[in-house]
Amino acid sequence: KNIFSLRGDRWKEMRNILSPSFTASKMKFMFELISKCSHNFVNYLVDHPELCCEMETKGAFRRYTNDVIATAAFGISVNSMKDRDNEFYTRGVEATTFATGILAIAKITFLRACPRLAKLMGVSFFPPNTLKFFRRIVGETVKAREEQDIIRPDMIHLLMQARDKESASAPKMTLDDIVSQAFIFFFAGFETTSIMMCFAAHELAVNQDVQDRLREEVQQYLIEGNGEISYESLSKMTYMDMVISETLRKYPPVVMTDRLCTKKYELPPSLPGFKNVIIEREDQVLFPVYALHHDPKYFPNPNKFDPERFNDENKDSIVPYTYLPFGLGPRMCVGNRFALMETKILIAQLLQNHVILPVFALHRDPKYFPNPNKFDPERFNNENKDNILPCTYLPFGFGPRMCIGNRFALMETKILIVQLLQKF
C-alpha cells in the first residue's frame, strides 16, 4: 500500500497527498525540527570528545536520520545518541538489516512480480514485529491528535486530512494506508540518507581543500546569522550544493531505477548493423544510474571527486537524463528535498566545530610523509620521528579511545618476525 509499490491512479492519488509535505513552506517548518536534531547530535560529540578521535560514521549518522524522521514524520522526539537503545532506533535497525541479502532480493522480486499472490500468502517484506510497532505508534499518534485537536504540519497530519476528505472517485484512506506511507518514508530515509552522509564525510576527509572551502562558506553564513544557520542561509550555500551533488553523482543512493512502458516503442539500433529494439507495452525498462554517473562520456574522469562539475557554468551542460540520483519524472523520489536538507544541516554544523580527517589519507599525504608510497623505515629513526606532526600518524587511533591492545599487537608481531628471520 505504500507509494513505492502503488501503480496507476492509486499511485497518483497518494503522490498528490504526499507532495504537499515537501513544499518550500513545509520544508521551512521542518528545518527547525531537523536543526534541533542536528544540534543534539553535534552537542553530544562536543560533550564526548573521546568519540571525535575515531568515529564509525555509518552508525552515528544512522542515529541522526532516525531522530530526524521520528520528529518530522511521526511527531516523536528521540535522541538516539544519548538514548542508544530507544525502540524507534532498534526497530529501524531491525527493518533495514532484515532488508538486505539474497532473501531480501528474492522477497522484493516476488512481491513486485506477484503482489496479489503475496497478499494471499501473507508474505511481508519486513519483520512482523517491526510492522506492529510502527502501526501502534501511528495509531497512538493519530488518536492523540484527534482527541486533543493537535495540528502539526507533518506527514501524519497530511495523511489524516486526506483520510477525512470525502471523494466519490477515490477510496477512503484507512489507518493501514497511513501506516504504510509513514513507514516507507522512515525506511527510505533511515538507511539511504545516512549512507549519503557517510560518503560526503569521506570525500570531505580525503579532499581537505574541498572541506576547507566548504567550511569557509559555512563560516560566512554563520557570521551573517550571528552564529546560527537559517533555512534561507542554507539555501544560499552554493558550494554546499555542489559538494552534495557530486557526492550523489559518485555514490548514487540507488544503482538503477526502473519504469514500465505504457505503449509500444521502437528504439533505433545502438550500433551500425544492429537491429532496432522494440519495447512492448508493459515491458519493464531498467536504467543503470551508477553506470551513467560513471560514464566518462558524460562525466570526464568520473572517479575523481570534483564539485566543480556542478558550478553554475558546468551544471547546465550536463546531458539530460544522465544525472539521476533521485530518479526523474513523476515517480522521482518525493522526499529528495527533505533528504538533501537534513544532510546539509548536519554537515554545516559539523564543520562549524570539527575537522574531518581520514587516517589512510593522512598516512599517504606527501605533505606529512614525503614520497608516501615508498616503504622507508628511516622515517621513524630517532631524528625523524620527532618531526612527525601531531595527529598525522594514527595507526591505532588517538586519545582516550586509542586501541587499548596496541602494545600487545605490536609485541606479538615483533616476536614472530624475529623468529622467522632467525630461521629463514
Image (spheres, helix red, strand yellow):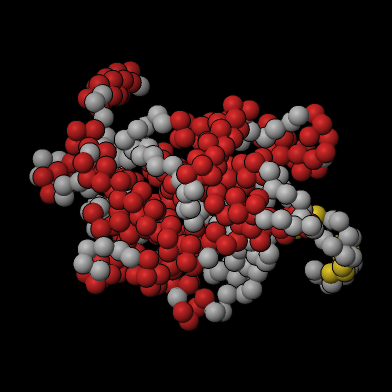
Q: Which residue is found at the position 64% from the left and 41% from the top?
A: 175
Q: Is residue 96 left or right of residue 85?
A: right
Quadrant that contains the C terminus: top left
Q: Is residue 147 left or right of residue 77?
A: right
* Percent position of residue 325, x then y: 57, 60
Q: Which residue is found at the position 69% from the left and 48% from the top?
A: 173
Residue 269 or 310: which is nearer the viewer? Answer: 310
* Percent position of residue 55, x then y: 32, 40
Q: Is residue 173 left or right of residue 301?
A: right
Quarter of the image for residue 46 reads: top left
Q: Which residue is found at the position 87% from the left and 65% from the top?
A: 263
* Residue 216 visible in the picture: no
Residue 203 or 45: which is nearer the viewer? Answer: 45
* Residue 328 visible in the picture: yes
Looking at the image, residue 86 lies above or below residue 243: above
Residue 147 or 348: which is nearer the viewer? Answer: 147
* Percent position of residue 210, x then y: 34, 64
Looking at the image, residue 202 lies above or below residue 304: above
Residue 191 or 277: which is nearer the viewer? Answer: 191
* Percent position of residue 161, x then y: 60, 54
Quadrant that contains the N terminus: top right
